[in-house]
Amino acid sequence: AAHSFDYDMIVIGGGSGGLACSREAAKLGKKVAVLDYVRPSPPGTKWGLGGTCVNVGCIPKKLYHTAGLVGQTLEDAKHYGWNVEKEKVQHNWEDLKSNIQDHIGSINWGYRVALRDENVEYINGMGEFVDPHTVKVTTFNRKTNAPQSSKQITARHIVIAVGGRPKYLDLPAGVDRELCITSDDLFSLSKPPGKTLVVGASYVSLECAGFLTELGYDTTVMARSIFLRGFDQECAEKIVDYMSAHGTKFIRPAVPINMEKTEQNQVKVTWSQDKGTAASDVYDTVVLAVGRVPETRWLGLDKAGVVSDGAGKLVVNQAEQTNIQHIFGIGDVLQDKPELTPLAIQTGKLLSRRLYQGSSELTDYDMIPTTVFTPLEYGSIGLSEEAAIAKFGESNIEVYHSYFKPLEWTVPHREDNACFTKLICVRSENDRVVGFHYLGPNAGEVTQGYAVAMRLRATKSDFAATIGIHPTTSEEVIKLRISKSSGSDAKTTG
Ligand code: FAD
Ligand code: NA7
């Protein structure tokens, strides 16, 4: 208690979680510093304040996805009476890239202004622990990236919000670091990606491959096992079927074993596939989307005595407290928690309210909704069918499912039986809905509200008693009546 610190709170990392936490603490009258430093990616990409979501995540990826959807709309347009001459429709990567990057620049600036207005001290420097209450801050030269100056600051509370960065394959001699890019580089690529290989089967991989295909690039996904691990596998396969039908190529199961630069400055990728046979092809761009690594290894966690798991993720209690009482973790650095921006924001805000406002509200990690922005979008809440069976037992689960065709797809004669929805219910709990799945247009918009109902423990009959909005795709969820156990066909008959 006799201690005096420079700050009430130091937040290491100015991304979704760190900004929300520091701004809330300052709003509650505390003296707060937030440190944000972006290590350049292997190809040298850097960006401004705001973390992954704003610069190299949610925001650019949804805008590129939208560019892809606009292309699809142009295809549909002639059926709606618009005279769109196909030969005249062209896409320009550079224009899209600069417009998106300009928007990101304006968000970066908006954050800096907000922090200044709200009395949060922003330091564009890298933080690392010296001892449990002391952080060393190093600033770097903007041009050369060489360390420039350093100082030590202390705080009563320290919040670790450093997020993660894309994983590499670690091929022999580091060839993948030299020849591949990741989502950290793709959205600001100065020239069109051309023929592209995307390695990995994460949602990031499928989203990137999806918009590249829709923008007209020859795109291949290479996966070593299942798609979208952790997500409902029936839905994951339907996404891949739709993408295949719309031009994305898939190589599976396969893993890259070597890469080399060709004389034309392309990348020759050799992979090992079924039964160990090798094959190869040449690409203009290779994007790795094989998962993310937490940024904790540069933090000197041992100097503060903070425990992390084998992967470098923080082990925290339900109040996001590490094993050291005054050190907390929020966002993507947490072990076994979904990596999502709204969750990082909520967790950061509630942490500051508990520390400085006497609140006792904890982050609720149950029934978190999410959407994968693949060309056929996928919204989900709660459990996958696999997870529901594992948790409740197969005989205690009923699944209601149906394909559907959006009205908007009929006039342009788009395909039948691509869009799909299912609800997973627990029989012994009056058919309480524990899993929501929706494959179709505007999945994020459709999914969000249903999460409120599921938090309130809605049952299948609550869904059925709700009046739909006609004509929408969201009403398909309300209308579900074919159970899997009945064996009836979930396909529509046109
Ligand atoms: P981050 O936002 O990563 O912020 C951490 C910050 O800390 C970074 O700026 C980092 O440079 C900085 N930092 C790291 N170490 C230090 C240090 N030692 N000192 C100072 N600063 C440091 N989520 C969604 O909800 N919806 C989506 O659609 C979505 N799409 C995504 C698409 C992609 C391609 C990716 C990669 C992610 C996506 N996410 C999405 C996930 C989302 O971006 C993250 O969950 C979110 O950004 C996590 O916030 P965070 O605060 O934990 O970390
Ligand atoms: P994920 O979702 O775990 O995805 C990683 C993907 O990359 C997955 O498809 C992996 O295949 C694949 N992978 C990993 N290493 C390799 C190598 N060496 N070679 C080929 N392919 C590889 O990681 P994210 O970090 O993107 O996911 C973050 C969040 O998304 C997470 O919280 C989930 O809730 C959803 P695998 O399945 O292991 O065979």
Image (cartoon, rainbow, N blue to C red):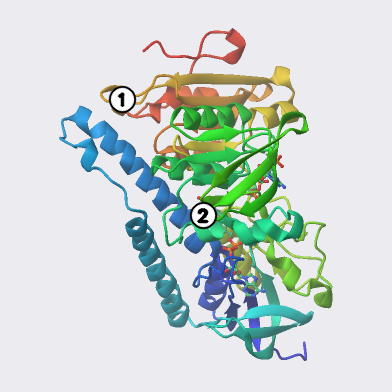
Image quadrant occupied by the N terminus: bottom right
- Name the residue located 45 percent from the left edge and 45 percent from the top edge: 212
x then y, percent, for residue 410: 30, 22
Q: CA distance from mark 2 to mark 1?
A: 47 Å
Which residue is most to the front? 263
Q: Which residue is mark 2?
A: 264
Q: Which residue is mark 1?
A: 407
* Left-right relation of 229 to 375: right
Ligand 1 appears in which quadrant?
bottom right
Mark closer to the chain start, 2 or 1: 2
Q: Secondary structure at mark 1?
A: helix
Tell me which amino acid carries mark 1.
Answer: Leu
Q: Is residue 456 visible?
A: no
Q: Nearer the viewer, residue 252 or 207?
A: 252
Observer-side mark, 2 or 1, equals: 2
Tell me which amino acid carries mark 2.
Answer: Gln
x then y, percent, for residue 31: 58, 84
Dot label at residue 4 = none
Q: Secondary structure at mark 2?
A: loop
Image quadrant where residue 320 sits: bottom right
Mark 2 lies within 8 Å of ligand 2 (Cβ measured): no
